Amino acid sequence: MKIIKRISRLFALFAIYIIAAYGYLTAKGFIYSGNQFILSNQAYAQDESFSRKVSGDVGLRSERIRAQGNPNAPLTMYIYSSLACAHCRDFHRFILPKLQRDFISKGKLRFIFIHFPIDAMSMRAAKLSYCLPAERFYKFIDELYDKKDWLFAKDEEKLYAYARRFGMSAQGLEACKADKKLTSDILLVKDKAIETFNITGTPSFVIEGADGKEVILGTKSYGDLKAYLEQRLGAQR
């Protein structure tokens, strides 16, 4: 019994030490990321591998802009995303809600989704999202990321069933499928992303503020994105 009590006491002391050390480091401005503590206000100013400065315009036509958040927010996040991309799906389902809670709903960040189709099915889905009324755009995106049966179906009928479920008529569906200008617009924006920002995969992000534009390539954790956005917001003041 004495040995058990001693072991329990040692574990308790160790736990207290860990909690105290964590509290001290976080109070000093450190965050825990990638199995190590990093100083949050320096983490991304010095880490060029996380983001890099770019110039140029995303080239998105005004009628294709589907934005969430305050149009006067100090930062705008453009996400290049494919509806056939598993990492994009994870971002949309698990990270975007946290961005909405901490940044978008508080007027700190404007969020704009840009289609970057990687196959024929994701191109069809991208076109359908633009053919729906603008207020249904994100709900449709939510549904397609939540349900994957359309993506692995032998044909596009399951995908078109989702469009009909969101109110698209048979005539509207046929018009959308035949809209070559819409196809061209989506591909031109994708090509411009490749040429201007060297974006070749999804998800990728362009973050724009008064201090310019930076591009972030690939999947990032919410903790990393949050620290980065807070650093960028601090630079806007």
Image (cartoon, rainbow, N blue to C red):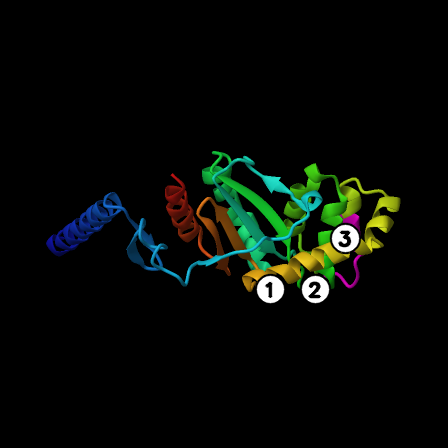
Residue extent of the magenta highlight: 152-162
Disc 1 is placed on an element classified as: helix
**Which one is earlier in the sequence, the residue at label 3 or at label 1?**
3
**At 56% from the left edge and 63% from the top edge, which residue is drawn?**
199
Choose between 219 and 166: the one closer to the eye.
219
Q: Residue 215: x percent and y percent?
A: 49, 57
Disc 3 is placed on an element classified as: helix
In the picture, the disc for residue 195 is: 1
**Residue at the extreme left:** 2
Q: Which residue is mark 3?
A: 182
* Nearer mark to the viewer, of 3 and 1: 1
Q: Is residue 48 above or below residue 222?
A: below
Q: Is residue 126 above or below residue 49?
A: above
**Which one is earlier in the sequence, the residue at label 2 or at label 1?**
2
Q: Which residue is mark 2?
A: 119
Disc 2 is placed on an element classified as: loop
Q: Residue 30: x percent and y percent?
A: 28, 49
Q: Amino acid at mark 2?
A: Asp
Q: CA distance from mark 3 to mark 1?
A: 20 Å
The reply to whether discs 3 and 1 touch (Cβ–Cβ < 8 Å) is: no
Q: Is residue 17 above or below residue 109?
A: below
The reply to whether discs 2 and 3 touch (Cβ–Cβ < 8 Å) is: no
Q: Is residue 156 above or below residue 146?
A: below
Left or right: 179, with 82 as reference point: right
Q: Amino acid at mark 1?
A: Glu
Residue 50 lies in the magenta-colored region:
no
